């Protein structure tokens, strides 16, 4: 728990997405069902057309879209994001399918308070195509990792992992469906432990 927080107060999260936002959805429903004691104070996307942004708005959650301009250093978009997260006084930054690599400047602004979910058993299959890569490697098992975020891509202290078997005949779609189902349970449960228990 953050030292500045009063006991009993729910920590604020800024959730960052780039696409569908199904993990964001699972996290928000866990807060509403009392499974995760936290508040979603902001949803941020680098893509104004991300379907997850619309979902967040229909749930009455404040959203922000910050497109990254081509040829412009990432720090420019990030400084707008950092400012908005600080203005909402979020204690935690929760990456849920945010597909831009964060710069050291961003990591420094929220050191040890940024969490990510990745659809593989890290350190295996980092990157943007982890499910496809696990299938292409003919792995028997892949899974889901929740980890603290440092300066490297899909890297940092691992806080939870769960295996997902790759079945004969699996396609990227069928495997992704099982991985997502696992993510939707593992992420809210792990955030609850991270925010409220000692790791
Ligand atoms: C999730 O499977 C997440 O693990 C992955 O993006 C997907 C987002 O789905 N993240 C990464 O690959 C990070 N390298 P969602 O928008 O439906 O939550």
Image (cartoon, rainbow, N blue to C red):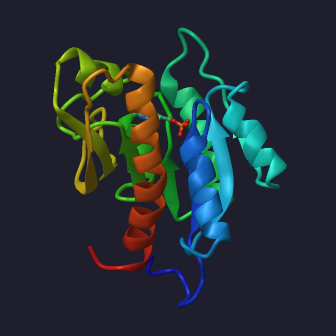
In-front residue for pair 164/80:
164
Count how many numbered circles sit on residues in the image: 0
Q: Quadrant of residue 35?
A: bottom right
Q: Is residue 44 above or below residue 1?
A: above
Residue at x 80%, y 46% (from the top left corner): 57
Q: Is residue 190 above or below residue 106?
A: below
* Image quadrant containing the C terminus: bottom left
x then y, percent, for residue 16: 56, 43
In-front residue for pair 24/47:
24
Residue at x 47%, y 27% (from the top left corner): 100
In-front residue for pair 51/198:
51
Q: Would residue 72 be found to the left or right of residue 1 on screen?
A: right
Q: Is residue 158 above or below residue 18?
A: below
Residue closest to the far front: 168
Residue at x 40%, y 49% (from the top left corner): 182
Q: Would residue 156 be found to the left or right of residue 74 on screen?
A: left
Q: Would residue 97 be found to the left or right of residue 89 on screen?
A: left
x then y, percent, for residue 49: 73, 24
Residue at x 23%, y 28% (from the top left corner): 125
Q: Is residue 32 above or below residue 93?
A: below
x then y, percent, for residue 174: 42, 28
Q: Quadrant of residue 130?
A: top left
x then y, percent, for residue 101: 41, 29
Residue 47 shows in this picture: yes
């Amino acid at each position: 728990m953050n030292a500045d927080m009063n006991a009993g107060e729910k920590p604020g999260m800024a959730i960052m997405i780039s696409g569908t936002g199904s993990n964001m959805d699972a996290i928000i429903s866990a807060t509403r069902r009392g499974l995760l004691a936290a508040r979603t104070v902001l949803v941020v996307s680098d893509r104004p057309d991300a379907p997850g942004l619309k979902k967040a708005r229909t749930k009455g959650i404040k959203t922000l879209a910050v497109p990254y301009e081509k040829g412009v250093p990432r720090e420019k978009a990030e400084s707008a994001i950092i400012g908005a997260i600080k203005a909402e006084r979020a204690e935690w930054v929760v990456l849920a399918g945010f597909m831009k690599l964060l710069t050291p400047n961003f990591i420094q602004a929220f050191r040890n308070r940024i969490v990510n979910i990745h659809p593989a058993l890290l350190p295996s299959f980092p990157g943007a195509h982890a499910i496809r890569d696990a299938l292409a490697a003919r792995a028997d098992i892949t899974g889901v990792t929740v980890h603290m975020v440092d300066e490297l891509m899909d890297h940092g202290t691992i806080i939870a992992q769960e295996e997902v078997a790759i079945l004969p005949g699996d396609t990227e779609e069928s495997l992704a469906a099982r991985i997502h189902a696992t993510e939707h349970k593992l992420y809210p449960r792990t955030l609850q432990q991270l925010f409220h228990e000692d790791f």
